[in-house]
Amino acid sequence: MRLVPISFVALFSACEVEPQEPDIEDLEIADLDADADTDGELYVRKAGTSIWMSRELERRDSKTGAAVFVLRGRVSRNLTGGLGFVADDPYGEFAIQGARRFEVTWPVSTARSLVDGVDQFVRTSFVPSSDRPEHLTSRVVIRPRLAELSGSSRIDLTTELVPIVVDGVLVYRGSGSSTCEIAGVAMDASGVVIAGRATDTTHFEYDLDPEAVLAIAETGATVSIRVVLANGSVVAKVASLGLSIKRFGITPVA
């Protein structure tokens, strides 16, 4: 897998000529912390076709009032249709939003697999072209991610929550460090206190189960990381918790 930089690009109108660029087929965000407070789009290109996707998934209320997560995308060619799926099953509702724009949405009630990091495929179909494929399939992998961090400068937090298995159970692990020696750590998530633990004198970690991640992301609530220092003082950092693309590429899956 090849690491390439994130591209932030201007909108193309239907009449503009797309610049000729080399293929960028696969993108892995090696360090979600690198642009932790930057919104934008991720970009890949294959077979004369460019695809952009919003880095952050939007949380939105649907027409029925139920919360949904929304992945927004756009392409360099006119769309005729599309499909969201995992393995051999449809997953995510694909909708064309304009000639070259689309969305894929997941109700929070069905988004557990998405949060667990399943390979999510998005097939896009285009107006036929003599020298370009009629269909392309993108692959995205989603991660829970902290954003809008504020609070004590004595604490640094990694923004990506990493999925790991502990005693046969999947959890999402966050981590951080302090400039001072640590005596204790706790996270307050929507009024629920979750104990953390020090991994050495200045580093710590904490775990959230996927259902807690979904509940926090659904409500848009903030989380608070409180660190008790060895001198008895307490410092804290506050952040929002949402979903973000970790990997994005064009795949040979049909």
Image (cartoon, rainbow, N blue to C red):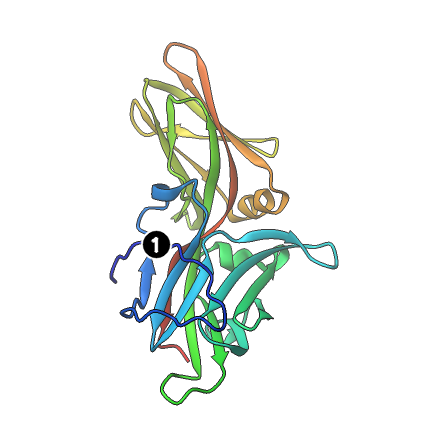
Residue depicted at 47% across the width and 23% down the height: 236
Residue 71, above or below 138: above
Residue depicted at 59% across the width and 62% down the height: 105
Residue depicted at 38% across the width and 25% down the height: 155
Instruction: Tell me where residue 134 sits by quadrant.
Output: bottom left
Q: Residue furthest bottom?
A: 130
Would residue 118 be visible to someone looking at this image? Answer: no
Q: Name the one closer to the observer, 220 or 164.
A: 220
Would residue 190 be visible to someone looking at this image? Answer: yes
**Is 70 placed left or right of 234 in the picture?**
right
Looking at the rendered image, the quarter that the C terminus falls into is bottom left
Which kind of residue does numbered mark 1 sit on? Ile
**Is 195 placed left or right of 155 in the picture?**
right
Residue 151, above or below 77: above
Residue 185, above or below 144: above
Which percent across, then down, holds residue 209?
A: 50, 45
Which percent across, then down, holds residue 84?
A: 52, 70
Residue ID for mark 1: 6
* Residue neighbourhood size for the residue with mark 1, other residues' Cα within 10 Å, grouped as few (<14), some (14–19), many (≥20): some
Which percent across, then down, holds residue 150?
A: 47, 28
Which percent across, then down, holds residue 187?
A: 50, 30
Q: In what element is the residue under mark 1?
A: loop
**Is 86 placed left or right of 50 in the picture?**
right
Looking at the rendered image, the quarter that the N terminus falls into is bottom left
Instruction: Tell me where residue 201 sits by quadrant.
Output: top left
